[in-house]
Image (cartoon, grey):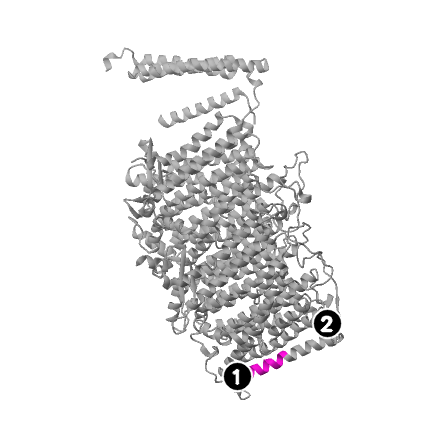
Amino acid sequence: MMYSPDQLLPLLVLIPLVGGLALSLLPNQVVPAMAFVWTVVTLAVSVVVACLAYQPIDGNPAVTFLSSGDLFFESFIPWVDGFGLSFSFGLDAISLWLVLLTTALMPLVMLGSFSAIKHRVKEYYTWLLLLEAAMIGTFVATDLIFFYICFEFTLVPLFFLIGIFGSTQRLKAAKVFFLYTFTGSMLTFAGVLYVAWFNASQTGLWSFEIAQLARAAQAMSLEQQTWVLLALLAGFAVKVPLFPVHTWLPLAHTEAPTGGSVILAGVLLKLGTYGLLRFALPMTPIATVVYAPTIATFAVVGILYTALICWVQKDVKKLIAYSSVSHLGFCVLGMFALNTIGVSAAVMYMINHGLSTGALFLCIGMIYERFHTREMARMGGLARVMPIWAFFMVFFSLASVGLPGLNGFVGEFLALLGAFMARDVLGVGYAVAAGFGMILAAIYILYMVGKVVFGPVLIPEHDDQHQPPYPSGHTHGKHAHVRDLNAREIMTLTPLAVGCLLLGLFPTPLLSSLKPAVDKLVEPARLVLAGRPHGEATIDEVTTIIFIDPTVQHGHPQDPDAARHGH
Amino acid sequence: MPETIGLHSFILSHFLLTGAVVFALGLVGFLSRRNLIVMFLCTEMMFQGVAISLVAFSRYHANDTGQTFVIFVLTIAAAEAALALGLVVLLFRRKRTLDALAWSQLHG
Amino acid sequence: MDDRAIDIARLIPWLPALSAVVCGVCCTSRKLRVLAAPVCIAAIAAAFVLTLKAYPHVFDDHGHGVFHVSWLFTWIRVGGFTADMSYYLDPLTMVMLIVVTGVGTLVAIYAAGYMAGDRGYARFFAAVSLFIFAMTTLVMADNLVLLYLGWEGVGLCSYLLIGFYYDKPSAVAAAKKAFIVNRIGDLGFALGIFLTYHQFATVQFSELFQILATQPSEASTPVQIIPFLLMLGAFGKSAQLPLYVWLPDAMEGPTPVSALIHAATMVTAGVYMIARLFPLFELSPYALPTVAIVGTATALFAATIAMCQYDIKRIYAYSTISQLGYMFLGLGVASTTAAVFHLLTHAFFKALLFLTAGSVMHSLAGQLDLRHMSGMRRKMPVTCWLMFFGCLALAGFPFTAGFYSKDMILADTLQKGLTGHSTLYTVLAVAGLFVAFLTAFYTFRLWFRVFMGPTKYEMGQEHGHGADHHPDGVSSDIKVEHHHEPHEVNWLMNAPLLVLAAGALLAGYLAHHWIGDMIQGSSARPLRQAIGAHGAAHHATLFGMDLHLAMMYISSVIAVVGIATAAYFHWLNRGAADRVAAKWAGLVRVLANKYYVDELNDSVIVRPLRFIGYLCFVFDRLIIDGLVMTVGFVPRMFGLALRPAQRGALQGYGIGMATGTAVVVLLVLMVYF
């Protein structure tokens, strides 16, 4: 063996971590460039990992690391042996794609920040790199405590990014963001520790391996699972954020610097959905099946409610922030459809939303850099003066609205289809209600595009007259001081646009690579639905479910999705 | 190994009493004086009171851990004293007084 | 693979797609801008040629229609759900492709002249290319999801092109309205797709039709709901009641766009969709009657509004809605042949009408108001007669294209009413005849007003050459001529109109039998309700004549009467028209204000919804965030309460510590002793 792919995963975490710390040794002028280089190196390593994952095993092209759905490239660095703690790394298709999303977004965030951040440059890039390390760590961790450390550590860099580099209300935003999400995840920690304790009491050995915990937790009674699910929701639903615990997001997004917003929307919110996917579905299948309608109801209400709120926003960044809540409602809806289509759609939706909403935040950041305002009433018709920017803005808006052919459609369509098909769990009503979100999305996005991109030209006056307007490349008559995107900004947005188009036209390589891993996640819930609880579960639990929801017992065979699995 | 024990139990209580007295003196001193240096010396005294008890118990139980521990404590206390006195000097330079009440910004 | 010669048809959508990219690149440079039109025209024309090359392959050796599935690449496959980028080619597809690429080529040629000098020249052709890509994908799709892609794709292009003059707030609003109203229909469509997959476990046409052919005639309730959901999508796209409101506003776009998208092709997508999925619609006994009723109601409703409008393009827009209503009536009586036939002829004559209206606008600097022009015959003779032919066809004058197709729809409706002894269809047929009269009247009202009578005109507001061109001010490399006189447009623009005029006059006669064969060989062939199909049993008679023949006489008379009435009121005796209008002032006001539907929508739907949005926002800020903040305040309260304990005096802390330790020690002692 020339290489050992198992060592690549620790490397993925270490590169940005060490790189970020090393920045403090460098002179200020080279810091942004070096930070960019570090993220590109990380991206390169993650691409290598992805390529290796797609390598056929034993020369059979149909069999790759991805095709079994098991974890691969696992490695362990022992930590506290007595408690079964270790830094353990591993990937499956879901985490692989999310790592790729993270590593692909980071260089663009760096590129997009070059001109926006002029003060305390070193801190800014160091925090961003540490954030990247933590996010990648969350996705590749297979040990519960390691996962949790990374999960929580993401708060620290973002706290400083918002608190130092944000706009006027940044201190409040940073504080609210930190406390809100931290409080929730403390409860989550309690919940998973309970699962670990449960496992230890069952097996006599302490272990924090997520897969082992998931196996053990399935033997819990409905009541225990319900409490664990609640604890998981306390942390992860806040992070997603799911209605009604979403109120930290608009504030944090609006106040964060562009780079922070992009990361927040692009990756950090996905930690919540990823957590639900990794923990709730496999650990608490019975409770998940029982409470899926409740969670989905919150998701649907959130979709419609926040979509309506988007429509009355005056601040364009806040509009996009609220739209994130609405969008992730679709993601959660698909996830709790608990079938292959729905969960695949949820994963796809995470990636789509990362690309399109991240790009929208970048676009808005570019506007903010020029005009120092985000108020829609003060700008208009920017297509006339910034045609290239307008192209990207409209493009990403359409991706966000779910135009077929672009990425957003595939996720949204499949999430709704998944909910529609999940007759035992959700059913038609959820899909229909959420479908109205599609109309509302068109309304608020086009309202925003119509105000900002189209309409009569309105260039905001500078708040700060002392700051000289940016030098203009070419003149546009009376709007001479507004310049369109420069090469760096175009380079920032183009990869995202290409990604949106590629995922919109060729989603199948992604979806089919997800399938084994998704099937594995869905399996416990499917067994519960089939009335055959997993493993050592007693007959009492089955009766509990049937008592609570009489439809589960005989609903299964009519599900065409499941029926096809049969033959 | 009972034959190696040269001290009787009432002697142990003497040692403990000594330690307690030293500790109590230190405590009273700490609470009643406002001079930073004196207060610091009093904390050291409390420390030594505890150390005496440790040594006594260690001897009584024929277990050397206690005495080892005391050696550590003494070493650290020396280092600590160097640091603390430095800090006190710093504080004195700021306000030209050694009164502990001069430093009460952290009141609620 | 020579047996798969039809696979060249796979390229049809992708040539315009390539052209869209090239035109997009042309947008970036002023020098490249002029290249956009040739590229776009070449791509659409090449697609037309490919269509003709693929045409013979959709028939077997006996001349019967067959279908081919041409697979291009995997699009969405997950958990048993398959929706690939593959194309379904049968005679119906060919008819639609000929219309889309044929009319598309002609309109693009016209637009090359019409849009000259506009700063968005390249952008226009990029959007048109993209539109042709989406539209050809729509008609060639082999599964519902790909059809949906084309469906939303044409909606997007419509959005971009209606809002082409994006400086105008009205254009932006119209574009937004079009997209959103279509989205409402699309939700129905999407749910229809879900339900189809739910019931039949496939969304591919070839599999679907196979399953449907073996379905019992009494379908289950969910299956019966499918056509109603899909219908909603069709009503949105084809501007039927109650989702028609976007189409009149869509006239904010450049006129070639109105001709291509909002008259000839995109708006007929709903008709195509129902024709394509006809076996699905036949499964419900209520679906087709609903389509017929909505179609007739829309035809009547829009025709009455068209009577009292003054804006040329808006009259044609309402006329389009009305004619689409006819097509839906045709579908509703299971006469898909007649519906698609009308779609074909309508594409020719309505494109012609819009483009000639564009010529009038072009020469009058954007003037579109009937009240401000008259006797233009002398200024623009070619345009005058071209539009005359279009008007004849629209009015259903004997032996023009519109005459044949409209007659077929009405005859089939009446036949269904008479043979089935159904009052409903008889009433619909009579209503259809009344609409024919209205159509003839409003069509020629416009024509007589514009071209006949004394020559009078007021130039429009838009200076320079531009009809509805944006006042650019930038002298581009395309030569800009400034006219202050109405003038005939150049032959680059008139040449394609001649082709369309030929189609408007002759297509009905020539394609009469051809279209029947095409539809009978496609999935649109009615399987269960063959009564209305062309060539089916001619049992019914009227006045002792064959029904179709009788209908020809009746509708000829109606058309001539309508034209004559219009000639009297709007050419020979214009004063009489004003007197009649004054007598019915209330009715005229209602019609001129389009039955106040826009106002109603605004006050019943838009405003309340936005108000709810505000309520939600306030609720979110005050209640939900307030609750969270209250929860956050509880620990703060504890902190506030305990604050005085921290006095900042070292001794105080010392006493606290000592006391605390003492208490703990005491407690321990008490427990142990």
Which of marks 2 and 1 precedes in the sequence? 1
Mark 1 crowdedness (10 Å alpha carbons): few <14, some 14-19, many ≥20: many
Q: Which residues are magenta?
A: C548-559
Q: Which mark is residue C547?
A: 1
> Residue A530's x, y, as percent?
33, 56
Judging from the image, what secondary structure is the residue with disc 1 in?
Answer: helix
Residue projecting furthest to the bottom: C544
Quadrant holding the N terminus of chain A: top left
Q: Is residue C609 above or below residue C554?
A: above
Mark 2 crowdedness (10 Å alpha carbons): few <14, some 14-19, many ≥20: few
Q: Is residue B87 left or right of residue C250?
A: left
Instruction: Judge whether residue C552 is colored magenta.
Output: yes
Residue type, label 1: Leu
Determine the residue positioned at 54% across, 60% down. Answer: C184
Q: Of helix, strand and loop, which mostly describes the magenta segment?
A: helix
| Viewer-nearest residue: C643 or C31 | C31
Q: Is residue C337 above or below residue C174?
A: below
| Viewer-nearest residue: A394 or B54 | A394
> Residue A255's x, y, as percent?
57, 39
Give the chain of mark 1: C
Instruction: Judge whether residue A159 is colored magenta.
Output: no
Q: CA distance from mark 1 to mark 2?
A: 39 Å
Quadrant holding the C terminus of chain A: bottom left
Q: Are marks 1 and 2 on the same chain?
A: yes
Give the chain of mark 2: C
Q: Which mark is residue C585?
A: 2
> Residue C549's x, y, as percent?
54, 83
Quarter of the image where one finds residue A460: top right
Residue type, label 2: Ala
Q: Is residue A56 left or right of residue A47?
A: left
Q: Are marks 1 and 2 in contact (CB under 8 Å)?
A: no
Quarter of the image where one finds residue A49: top left
